[in-house]
Image (cartoon, rainbow, N blue to C red):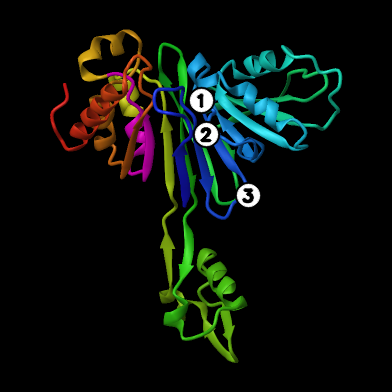
Amino acid sequence: MFTAEVKSRIGEDIAIMVRPDNHPWNYLCECGDAAAITVKEFQNANAIFISHTHIDHFVNFDSVIRHQLGIQRRVIICGPKGLAKQVQSRIISYSWNLIQEGAISYEIRELIIENTIDVYELEPPTWELKKLETINGNMLFQEKNFQVTGILLDHKIPTLAYKFQEHDTVKIDITASGFKGGRWVKELKDAFEQDHSDKIIAIEDQEFKANELFHLLHIQKGDTVGVIMDHAANAENHAKIKAHFSNSRKVFVESFYKDEDKEQAEINYHSYASMSGKIMKESEIQEPVPVHFSRKYKEEDVAQLISEFNDALANLSVS
């Protein structure tokens, strides 16, 4: 399972933290308001996911740099085309005569077009930008138990929407087996995953064919968290969102404008609250979360934004 929470204050620039269960690292989505992010959380960020580099999504990247100096490991930064040079520009705007090699290294992965990722490297003290490779596909990050994929949306510039997908896992009902846990549990799961139904499983001086015990197993579907930031409320973007995020558990989605400001949303290639709710409903998202409201709104306006979003989820009409 993932724990995901908004770390920015309402009315401030967006930042979201994703934490997998039983995992040593966390994952930062967007570099907006950092007031609720601790130094330790910055240091434990194993990867950073940027949708695009408008100031409200990238303004606090310097906080990442500041707190990660000296952690002596490699950190992944993902985003759209051009991000690598922008990261480099932010870094080299400072003087680095006292930094040592190995203090930190960054690997930047740009989804330049659908299903094509360019990979770069930045390391002190020179911070020279080196291209490492080009990868086919849209998998921007992978760990043992989960992966992160991305799709490009139109915000008058390309923006990246991210999906954290936990791998399905095989679980066992130990109580129903009548035995104590032990090495045999792993052997049984391995036999199930590798379709070795005749493998002999030894349990407490008894032997069974693996398929005699398969009834104790079940597949637990992996958790899913999505982050969909700035995008025009148009048919092409909506089709991509529904295709990529359908049936996800939790999705954070920008709801920048109130319905009465729909025309402004269209001019600025943003979504508006009720349309974001409608797309979440059509995508069958279990826990949709409206976020990233325009800073022009006051607290009571934000309440209206959330209400319009929730009304759309309740199947009320959206034009």
The answer to which image quadrant residue 275 occupies is: top left
The answer to which image quadrant residue 87 occupies is: top right
Image position, residue 216 (x, y; %): 43, 75
Q: In this view, does 119 lie above or below 142?
A: above
**Which residue is painted at 73% across and 18% down in the image?**
129
Q: Which of 61 and 129 is in front in this view?
A: 61
User: Circle 1 is placed at which residue position?
Assistant: 33
Helix, strand or loop for disc 2:
loop
Left or right of 126 in this view: 298: left
At label 1, which amino acid type do we have?
A: Asp
Callout in the foreground (2, 3): 2
User: Circle 3 is placed at which residue position?
Assistant: 24
Specify few, some or many for label 3: CA neighbours under 10 Å numbering under 14, 14-19, or 20 or more: few
Q: What stretch is highlighted in magenta?
A: 241-257
Left or right of 12 in this view: 119: right
- Residue lying at the far top in this picture: please name it: 267
**Which residue is painted at 85% across and 29% down in the image?**
101
At label 3, which amino acid type do we have?
A: Pro
Q: Which of 246 and 180 is in front in this view?
A: 180
User: Circle 2 is placed at which residue position?
Assistant: 36
**Which residue is painted at 47% across and 67% down in the image?**
171
Look at the image and say whether residue 246 sits in the magenta stretch: yes
At label 2, which amino acid type do we have?
A: Ala
The answer to which image quadrant residue 41 occupies is: top right
- Which circle's residue, 2 or 3, is located before the other in the chain? 3
The Cα atoms of the two marked residues, 3 and 1, are separated by 24 Å
Circle number at residue 9: none
